[in-house]
């Protein structure tokens, strides 16, 4: 189980999602990283955050430019296919 968690987490930061709906889990996780570490703890599922009341539904996540992932950004902006879920923060 731990390996699944670690490899999933690594992929979130290093490679594009293989299946489009999985972008929701990344959005959930990146909000935890970049905005509020007290919510959205789940990496492989959002279920437990709902159970423990730490779920926050996020429309769009601001990703700091300095921490943006290569798979997400192209020519200094969020790739069109992900622009519905993320935008780039200038810091
Ligand atoms: Zn992470």
Image (cartoon, helix red, strand yellow):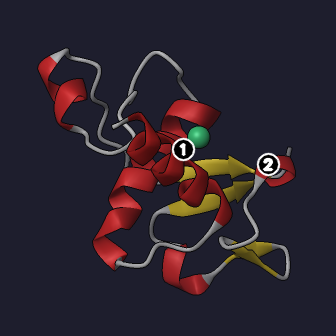
Residue 84 on image: x %, y %: 45, 71
Q: Quadrant of residue 55?
A: top left
Q: Residue at x 46, y 63 (%)?
A: 85
The answer to whether residue 35 is left or right of residue 20 is right
Determine whether 78 is above or below 1 in the image.
below
Dot 1 lies on which element?
Answer: helix
Residue 87 in percent (x, y) is at: 62, 61
C-alpha separation, residue under disc 2 versus residue under disc 1: 11 Å
Residue displayed at 62% across by 49% down: 62
- Callout 1 environment at 10 Å: few (<14), some (14 to 19), or many (20+)? many
- Closer to the camera, 56 or 5? 5
Give the x, y percent position of residue 65: 82, 54
Position of the N terminus by quadrant: top left
2 and 1 marks in contact (CB < 8 Å): no
Q: Is residue 3 above or below residue 70?
A: above
Query: Callout 2: helix, strand or loop?
Result: helix
For image coordinates 45% across by 54% down, the residue present is: 26
Q: On the image, numbered disc 1 is attached to which residue?
A: 30
In the rendered image, the vertical position of residue 30 relative to residue 11, given as above or below: above
Viewer-nearest residue: 12 or 49: 12
Ligand 1 closer than 8 Å to the CB at disc 1? yes
Instruction: Give ligand 1's quarter of the image.
Output: top right
| Above or below 62: residue 82 | below
Q: Which mark is residue 67?
A: 2
Other residues around mark 2 within 10 Å, as few (<14) / some (14–19) / many (≥20): few
Residue visible at 25% across and 26% down in the picture:
49
């Amino acid at each position: 189980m731990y390996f699944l968690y670690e490899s999933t987490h690594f992929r979130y930061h290093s490679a594009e999602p293989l299946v489009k709906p999985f972008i929701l889990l990344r959005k959930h996780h990146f909000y935890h990283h970049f905005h509020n570490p007290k919510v959205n703890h789940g990496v492989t599922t959002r279920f437990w955050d709902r159970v423990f009341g730490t779920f926050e539904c996020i429309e769009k996540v601001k990703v700091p430019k300095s921490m943006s992932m290569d798979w997400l950004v192209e020519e200094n902006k969020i790739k069109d296919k992900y622009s519905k879920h993320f935008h780039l923060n200038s810091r």
